[in-house]
Amino acid sequence: MTNNKHSFSVLDLCYIAMFTTLIAVLAQVSIPLPGGVPLTLQTFAVPLAGLILGAKRGTVSALLYVLLGAVGVPVFANFTGGLGIVLGMTGGFIVSFPLMALFAGFAANKSTKSPMLWLWLVLGAAVNYAVGTVWFMLVAGTGLQTALAACVLPFIPTAVLKIILSGMLGTMLRGVLRKANLLRGNGVTT
């Protein structure tokens, strides 16, 4: 571990890299939908990073993913990347991933056994949808009703499923890693 509470250990950096990679890999599970916003597993992987790594490391992992994609590394859905994707119709969903991981990390940092875990996960998803929908409206020049039909309504059932699965899997894996002494700290002070 490091002496400086604002720096990362080598182990932290490995976990951050591993979860950045996981987000990129799961982004490739993409189902195109008519509204222009694909169904991907990014929104499963991002809160998983926050839950397992904690707020600080999980947020950095999601931020690194966004930055890699923004500079052109093909980590976004369908092996795309570049500033054009980030500034495009679905860019709001992408840029809000660090916030989504942060909210999930808050949940994990407080207690993975608390009912607040689910509230934080739902809030993270809500922020992702809000930023993504407003961004879609601005870029596509649509109204709220059209944006909701393209960006929110088709995804509600899978969003609920992703929240439940990431919450269950994330808390389980965090517990296993901590018991095995492979994960220390809460992601805020380590």
Image (cartoon, rainbow, N blue to C red):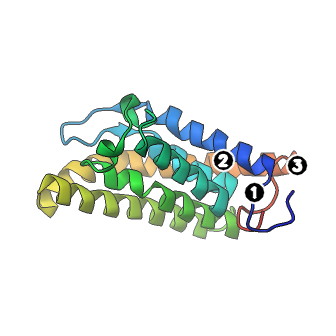
Alpha-carbon distance for marks 1 and 3?
17 Å
Residue 8: which numbered mark, if any? 1
Residue named by callout 2: 16
Tell me where residue 129 appears, x and y as whole percent.
Answer: 34, 58
Q: Which residue type does callout 2 highlight?
A: Ile
Q: Residue at x 53, y 40 (%)?
A: 23
Q: Is 108 located above or below residue 78 in the figure?
A: below
Q: Earlier in the sequence, mark 1 or mark 2?
A: 1
The N terminus: image quadrant? bottom right
Residue named by callout 3: 181
Disc 2 element: helix
Q: Which residue type does callout 1 highlight?
A: Phe
Disc 1 element: loop
Q: Residues within 10 Å of mark 3 (few under 14, many from 20)?
A: few
Q: Are marks 1 and 3 in contact (CB under 8 Å)?
A: no
Q: On the rendered structure, is 3 left or right of 133? A: right
Q: Are marks 1 and 2 in contact (CB under 8 Å)?
A: yes
Front-lying residue, 156 or 55: 55
Q: Which residue type does callout 3 highlight?
A: Asn
Front-lying residue, 168 or 99: 99
